[in-house]
Amino acid sequence: MQVYHLTKEELTMNAHEYALQANGSFALPDACFKVKALMEDDNSAISDFADVISVDPSMTSRLLQIANSAIYRFPGEISTISRAVTIIGTQAIYNMMLVDVAASAFKHFENQAINLKRFWRMSIYCGLVTKNLAIKAGIKDIERLFVAGLLQNFGELLVAKITPEVAQRCEKYSRDNLPWALQDLALGFTYTDISAELLKIWQLPEKIIIPIRHFNQAQSYQINQDVKVLNLASRLALLESHGDEFDYEELIDESLCKSLKLSKEDIEQVTEIADNDAASILTVMNPKLFSR
């Protein structure tokens, strides 16, 4: 294993400081905070949510695109934000806003330090697999887990933007040096640690942050199911992206599958769904990169 020595600049930055730099250049839109406040107000009405979102025609259009995409698979066409709120609820609308914010933020932090197509594909695939594993495992409120899966590796973009040379080191992972081990070696923490810090600054719901924050503790017997599902999904995303490099039996922890009561057939069904849905969702999320 090649040992990298951290520079003075790298040694002085922790996960929270990476997140602070990112938040300084890309903050969560006011609409997200307003919708969250409405969700916490018992007197709020559907029209209140629609009024907040519809002020921004671009966001309205994007949310309707997402609502009618393979991410949610709702029966029938959803043509207005009011109808979306009525049919799918305020939590789903809030989660859709976070997905749209993620799409904007991903593009905001684009650069040449990492393979962006690989990053996007793995992020979308991880979100889809996390959501569908949760369904198989009988976990409720699954939409938040799509968001957790989508955002869990957001820290990679921040490292690529702020210290690109470190991101390039971390991209040289292999079956002997898994991504998370290489990140910890280069940074002293992982990309998920940075992601969790940024989402905390953005005041996202704790239920979304917890599986990301405790990602590397998934093997603990006491840890909750969300963490285990996300950890398993991220490994399946790595396997899907680099099938020629990684081996299923070596990468996938069977004890995690057993604790979630997931069979190999369940895993195969989930990955097949993700494979089928990923292309159309990638086009919605980043048409510039995936409509070529």
Image (tube, helix red, strand yellow):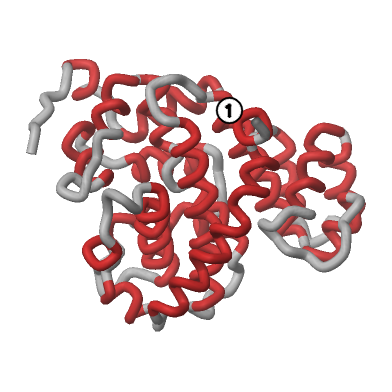
Toward the top, the furthest residue is 8
| 72, 245: nearer the viewer | 245
Residue at the image point whose x is 20% and y is 36% from the top: 188
Residue at the image point whose x is 70% and y is 42% from the top: 284
**How far across and how far down the image is residue 140, in percent?**
58, 74
Q: Amino acid at mark 1?
A: Lys
Q: In the rendered view of the protein, which quadrant contains the C terminus?
A: top right
Residue 40 shows up from this direction: no
Give left or right: position of 148 versus 78.
left
| Above/below status of 257 relative to 277 | below
Task: Tell me the element at label 1.
Answer: helix
Kindly indicate the quadrant of the structure image that contains residue 73: bottom right
**How far across and how far down the image is residue 139, in percent?**
53, 75
**How far across and how far down the image is residue 277, in percent?**
62, 57
Kindly indicate the quadrant of the structure image that contains residue 143: bottom right
| Above/below status of 40 relative to 9 | below
Toward the front, the furthest residue is 244
